[in-house]
Amino acid sequence: MIKAILIFNNHGKPRLSKFYEHYSEDTEQQIIRETFHLVSKRDENVCNFLEGGMLIGGSENKLIYRHYATLYFVFCVDSSESELGILDLIQVFVETLDKCFENVCELDLIFHVDKVHNILAEMVMGGMVLETNMNEIIMQVDAQNKMEKSEFFPFFSLFADVYLSVYQAGQVDTGRHRRGARTRRIRRKEHESPRNAQEHQHWRHQHKSAKLTLLQIVAARWLPRPADVHQCLL
Amino acid sequence: MALKIVKGSIDRMFDKNLQDLVRGIRNHKEDEAKYISTCIDEIKQELKQDNIAVKANAVCKLTYLQMLGYDVSWAAFNIVEVMSSSKFTYKRIGYLAASQCFHESTDVIMLTTNQIRKDLSSPNQYDTGVALTGLSCFVTPDLARDLANDIMTLMSHTKPYIRKKAVLIMYKVFLKYPESLRPAFPRLKEKLEDPDPGVQSAAVNVICELARRNPKNYLSLAPLFFKLMTSSTNNWVLIKIIKLFGALTPLEPRLGKKLIEPLTNLIHSTSAMSLLYECVNTVIAVLISLSSGMPNHSASIQLCVQKLRILIEDSDQNLKYLGLLAMSKILKTHPKSVQSHKDLILQCLDDKDESIRLRALDLLYGMVSKKNLMEIVKKLMLHVDKAEGTTYRDELLTKIIDICSQSNYQYITNFEWYISILVELTRLEGTRHGHLIASQMLDVAIRVKAIREFAVAQMATLLDNAHLLTGNTQRNGICEVLYAAAWICGEFSEHLENPMQTLEAMLRPKVATLPGHIQAVYVQNAAKLFATVLRSQEGNTDRTAAQETSQLMIDRLPLFVQSANLEVQERASCILQLVKYIQKLQQKDVEVAEEVNALFAGELNPVAPKAQKKVPVPEGLDLDAWINEPPSESESEDEKPRTMFTREETKHSRPRHTEVDEKELAKRREVRKQEQASNPFYIKSSPSSQKVYQEAPGVDHIPVVQIDLSVPLKVPGLPMSDQYVKLEEERRQKDRADKKKKEKKKRKEKGGRRGKRDSGPESEEDITPAHMVDIVTEEMPENALPSDDDDKDPNDPHKALDIDLDRPLADSEKLPVRSHRSSEALKTMAEEVEVVAPQEAKKKGGKEKKEKKKDKEKDRKKSKEEKKKKKHKHDEGEEDLMGGQTEEPMVQSETTNDVVAPPPTTTAEVSDLDFWLSNAPVPSNSQEVAVTAVTAPAAAAAAAAAAAAAAAAAAAAVPPAASGSAPDSEPDEPKDAEVDESKSSKHKKKKQKKEKEEKDKKKKKKHHHHRHHSDGAGEESVQNGTVEEEEEPLPPMSNYCLLAENSYIKMVCDIQGNLQDGSQVVVSLIFENKCDSFLKAMEFNVLDSLNSRLQRPDGAGPHDGLTVPFQLPPGVSNEARFVFTVKSIVMPQKLKGTLAFIVKNEDSSTHEKLDFKLHFTCTSYLITTPCYSDAFAKLLESGDLKASSVKLEGIVMPFPHLLARICFHHHFSVVERIDSCASMYSRSIQGHHVCLLVKTADQTVSIDAKCDEPSLLSNVLDEIKLTFSQC
């Protein structure tokens, strides 16, 4: 069983927390802090398993984590899960996020926790692994998003057309950083007011051009023979 | 357009969405809390609006805030509102919020029951999916009970997406509502063979979780899992199954034997490290469970250790870590095999990764021997000095002590060395393990008599230098060793060289800063020392020395009398008065030393830690019975303060001198108590304010600047343990030289530097301990009970799931359907509502539940009714929310019957398992089995039968009557031989393994054939004993029939209908590599007909072949499954197909192909479906069925045997059997009923059959006829 899934950044700010057992809000924060404390003081090239999180379950549980650029992805699991399997699962999770968000970076997780939750829900349910096939996960997530869009949705899609036109008008000069920029801009647009969207976009670009997207960093980082580990899943 | 823009911006102004909230929080870094509180106010406003969109937006923001640690439980009701929105978008937001912040004590949860039920049955699969996901996070016992049935229905949903979620959530339901496990289990089991890999994996997941906690109930599933293990190619599923087997093997050693081979195959063939690792782990578990009796088990161990070594040597830290972890499991049972990798493990001790160092430390425990203990500990001591983090250092410390003290100090040859190690360890600052060192010191000093003198000397030095240890007491746990030091010096004071000096050291004013319990020991042992000193001084002629000593005591003891600690105070004042009395006597020139010494006379014996517990209660003694009338409350309170003392007294201080001065002491105590009572200024605490400061809670966090001493603290005068290592080395060499003068030269080479390495057990024996050590064993009470305490957590939720799953279902166990709305219940509800207030109702519900658990079996029905009632009480609220829905009269209570699967048969399953474990060879043995098939195709069926017996057992298709029955005698000789042959091949296999030589197959077979004819009979009877209580076993049968073969490959197949989908047939094919080359790139293709077609993945053309998902090394077989879609099932079908593959030798590779014909018989469309006799009768009466009949002549086999054959080959189940007449039933995948009435008389069998599809029936009958004509 997976007891909890935590994502936090290099400073310990939670980006997503999913507990499969109930804890009070205070305890949850404490767990996040403790976990961050344990994980953050470890070197980059030490093993990805950690015992000793005292708050969740104690000695029977293990923390399995991966560090991507600015984010830590931590799974707290008990002895029934395969350690290497969970490492793969984290990789699948991040790759799925990357596909869903197009070059995912921390900002996507900051502003779209709900979407990350929805993606996670297709992978892990109630603490048990539901699906490990990335294509299947993405298919289900997309289908649900499509359904969402087809419904009347005053916050996001109702005024999408209007924003799009306004936004594009304002962006003609600035938004040309990359080839995929336009499609991304449209995606952003659904939920950002034009001014902020521009700001955000700019920031995003800075990050992206600085190669701070999670997966790019991962590719650069020393990784335990990804091909081998991957065989487990793909 | 413009209007829209305006409206949009107005919308935005009012509603801050999630992104705005996040941005806002990021922009208010300084006053985040303030900003969020204004946001929460806004959210509260938004939640008051009627617009569901606004509410959803607010709830979405709340979910985010919840993650940041804000309590949002106040919005629970609004979350429920959003959940019940008809729009998927909002529903999803609602369920997400609920899953994040609902839990069992959220009271609005009970309002959600109906909403969830509605969503579960929604036509939109994503509504259902979202509800299931949400429910998995907040399911409560009530929800589980009410929804179990709905979820169970979803397990057979047409969409695999829903099926897999429903299967997974069942685990949560079982946890919360254990009663649902038994009724749901058959269906769950069914899902193990679901065509969708996701569903299959979910089912495996759930059963593995269940089985991990209560493995014995799931043993009967072993054959099924075994089949999955050998056939599945999904690594996730494999890992889970292999882990499950790891949990099952300790319960059934035979299972382990069966597993070893496929697991080692997997270890050899897999390239996925995760799978390899789990296989190794399970092999280890198997080997642990098999204490002995495995011929080739050292080979398996070697394989594991070898693979683990590869892992440990890998540069990937993760693999290194896991390798060490698994290694430590082997260590417990096979320390020898691990010891050979000592070099590697010591190397890991120097790893930069702390986790890896810790794992390596675990392993060290088993690495030590008498020979290398000192060396290893020396190395660890070096690490202790280097270690920075306290956790790692503490871990090292405990490991050193563990290693040294293991199995009663077995490996310690020189206790002086050990004591000095312990003393060196006291130099650690800030360790938490002071008490551990202390207890070791005490233990060694008490139990090893020879060492006492040395120990006392060391302890005296420690006491002398106590100031070094007590630097800052509140942080330093190390001062605990002073407790031991003081006690040892006091108790064994006769060994002290200079007791006076030690006495002075113990009475220094600084002692008052030590923790209370240590002071108490100081005081007590100062008295002991005093006695010793007196004795030595009275021996002298100079009396003044003795008087001076008394004076010293009298001067120093008042310090302790003022102590805040009651224990210290009491002891000190007793002893003070005693010494004063002694002084008086001394002044009168009376010799007191003898009497004073009598206070502490007698030897202390070590008592085993569990001794107290193990004292058996004498017969007829009831410790719980009252001796007197129970005292009133007020009386018992008077007794309470006494418990305060027990904590300190538990350790080593014991009253040994009760008779001496008892009266006087008692009197004085009395006087003192009165004095204290009458003294208004007497408060508990002492004037020593410093002490109070130390003990006050919460001072821990006050930062104390730690003085960093670059030079390690060195207690002067203490011997360094290192010198013992050298001494020991010399001593050993000398010993050796003395002992074996002849072999002197040889020995010397081994000695010295290289001698440190473990050179085997022989030389181990040579090492004699430096001291003749008498390790006193711990005392145990007479006739102590040897039982070990079983301490299981009674609150473990999994305990409730310890349910026998093989017992047939009782009617009362069926899951409650929405019966609470039935008319009867409605009536009771109306009554209840009038009488009981909702809160009371809840309480009562809880009570009922408890009651229910108590006599689950007894009156389940009754309690079920009560439950229904209870359910109604909280439906009130629901009605508000859901409008009129609840009022709808739905009389569904009777629908339970068809949901609950019919009872599986216990005996059949148990014996199936036995059969599987004892008889059937491992399917992967089929390579061997096939040897027989080459020459005698007829034998193939029998041989394959043996291989597939597992499958047969797993399917549990054979009803008890059939599997239990057996023929009176084998029909003919050849058959007998075949059976023998298949057995012989099994033997042969083992032999082959052992000898590992390749012989001419034919020759060998003949040889074995011969041998078996000679002892066949004996062997058979033995096997019978293990299988059945009846006369003779059923000959092995299999549905796997030969499909095609050539010199490279053999294919056998089994065709089964798919229960889930009326138009699908699953073909299981076992491919077996018969040649010495590697077979790869196998492609399976079939020419589709109009009626039947192979299911190909999306995007593949209608003539594309399917790649077989594995490759075959020489001699290996593996199973793959292919799904076919069929339109009409009334006629048998034949499909032509080809298998193309590449044969790869070392130097060349060639393309080969093999043609085959797949024969879909009508039988393969039938599915074994149990049927009750009443339902059967109804079916026959209905008159919808067309009849047909057939007669079989010359059938010699016994009737039960005949039935078993029909059951097995044609997927029927026996409904009823009376003498020589039986009714049987089966169902086609498209729902046709097939009923048979089988009668036998004088070698003639007549079968009357009825079916709603005449052509199907006639084809089935033809096939039955064919089956019997063949035998």
Image (spheres, coloured by chain):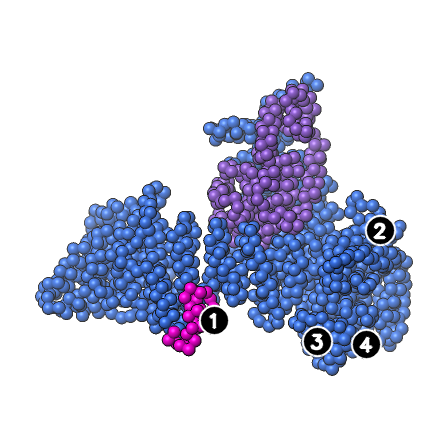
Chain colours: A purple, B blue
* Predominant SS along the magenta part: helix
Where is residue B1047, by image quadrant?
Answer: bottom right
Q: Which residue is mark 3?
A: B1024
Residue type, mark 1 in image:
Pro
CA–CA distance in space, label 3 to label 2? 44 Å
> Mark 3 or mark 1: which comes first in sequence?
1
Picture layout, residue B448 above or below residue A37: below
Front position among marks 4 and 3: 4
Q: CA distance from mark 3 to mark 1?
A: 45 Å
The CA span between labels 2 and 4 is 39 Å
Q: How many marks?
A: 4
Q: Are marks 3 and 2 on the same chain?
A: yes
Mark 1 lies on residue: B761
Q: Tell me which amino acid carries mark 2.
A: Arg
Name of the residue lying farthest toward the left: B588
Magenta range is B737-765
- Taking the spot 62% from the left edge, 52% from the top edge, the residue there is B171
Question: Does B743 appear in magenta?
Answer: yes
Mark positioned earlier in the residue sequence (1 or 4): 1
Q: Amino acid at mark 3?
A: Asn
How far from the left and from the top, in percent, is residue B496?
Answer: 23, 65
Q: Which mark is residue B1093?
A: 2
Q: Chain of mark 3?
A: B
- In this figure, which residue is indicated by the disc labeled 4? B974
